[in-house]
Image (cartoon, grey):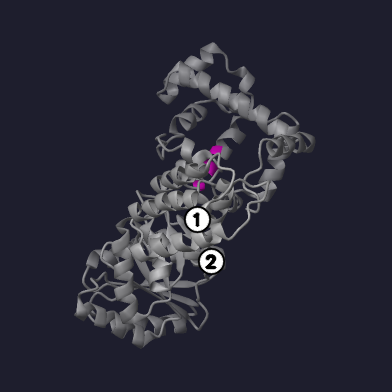
Amino acid sequence: MFENLTDKFERAFKVLKGQGQITEINVAETLKEVRRALLDADVNFKTAKDFTTIVKEKALGRNVLTAVSPGQLMIKICHEELVELMGGNESEIDVKGNPGIVLMSGLQGSGKTTFSGKLANYLKTKKGKNVLLVACDVYRPAAIDQLHVLGEQLNIEVFSNKEEKDPVKIAQAAVQHAKSKGFNVVIVDTAGRLAIDEQMMNEIARVKEAIQPTETLFVVDSMTGQDAVLTAKAFNEKINFDGVVLTKLDGDTRGGAALSIKAVVEKPIKFVGTGEKMDALDVFYPKRMADRILGMGDVVSLVERAQEQFNEEEARKLQKRIQKDQFDFNDFLGQLQQIKKMGNVKDLMGMIPGMGKAMKDVDIQDDAFKHIEAIILSMTPKERSNPALINGQRKNRLAKGSGTNIQEVNKLMKQFEDTKKMMKMMSNPKNMMSMMKQMKGMGGGIPGM
């Protein structure tokens, strides 16, 4: 995500490396590269120009403290302005009402139906809402079927009527059904449309007028860059939506849509989709996105994902087992499975400061753990609970049983031992304090960040 933009920002800041002070000349050189980076990312030209103008004014107006290098100060200012450019603070979705109604809009193929399912799952599991999904795409029967499949998968009811061809009537009937059955959120999935299609645009305007949604969202494919911003502008002029959803942010995203859309349309980005799975949905946090664009990682999101998957009681039990030196392959397998639930491994690594660049050219497949799991599942219950039993003969059996080779089995055994040592060390508060002091002494990051 945004790898090219991150690289180009990094190159731009190298202009100031080794400089003792900020001057008009070195700022101009840096911002020339920054503007080029933004334009290459398909950011709106006026937005890129305004951004660099503001950064220049702020940079030349600040004194550089002795503890802060010019390069660090420029990164800090760019970070502040990127956050502001993307909306400043996160924006909550409004689902208040009896019921709260969310209307989806967007182009064909932007991912509205998938996002409708993701949002329903998010509101059900994280907000405790009783959600009704509504299929209002009367032009594409497959979209109705897709929504029903997602509803079954998520155990969420889907309202549809394939006989009715007027989406306004379907939406109105769905809202009445929600009121009578006690649903407190209704998510209306509509047909994809082109901004230039006047008839279709009038149709969604009629749906909105009829059901008076508490929230209207514009769903856009983030890989379309500047085109996404222009389309958002056209939709906003017609239906005055409340917020934007960027889908496919896990793909080859240049960043133009994320960086331009708030400035051009003046509507916040509320959610980002980061994969096909129904839990691959994140609230959009401008500060965290700015951190990632500037190569600083996103530790807060990483911790939040971990907290969602890790049970506190299980964690306490595991800590006791580690302290008693009882950590075994059952525990190791459990930890792997929890990490898999957190999302794409490469994406998770990119959230760790400094790791994004290191992982840039590393290809990590979604099934990266399958060989490890196969080897562990080939072990007997006794071998999993007592790894010391695994000798050369047993390793040969495990290699054959898992469809791997002896080298991979040996590699796993070493990984297990290294993990066991590290976890035992980290379970001791004294060791943790020592590690924190060492990390602090290695250079602490950007002052004021």
Where, by quadrant of the figure, is residue 403 drawn?
Answer: top left
Question: How far across and how far down the image is residue 375, in percent?
Answer: 48, 26
Magenta region: which residues?
Answer: 336-342
Q: Secondary structure at mark 2?
A: loop
Measured as percent of width and height from the top left, residue 267 is found at 43, 73
Q: Which mark is residue 289?
A: 1
Closer to us: 217 or 32: 32
The residue at the far right in this view is: 430
The disc label shown at residue 88, or none: 2
- Residue 378 on image: x %, y %: 49, 26
SS majority, magenta: helix
Q: Secondary structure at mark 1?
A: helix
**Placement of 30 over or under 321, stated as above or below:** below
Q: Residue at x 36, y 59 (%)?
A: 43
Q: Please report the residue visible at 74 percent of the width from the left and 37 percent of the height from the top.
A: 437
Within 10 Å of disc 2 (Cα), the crowding (few <14, some 14-19, many 20+) is: some
The answer to whether residue 301 of the structure is visible from this angle is: no
* Residue 319 in sight in this render: yes
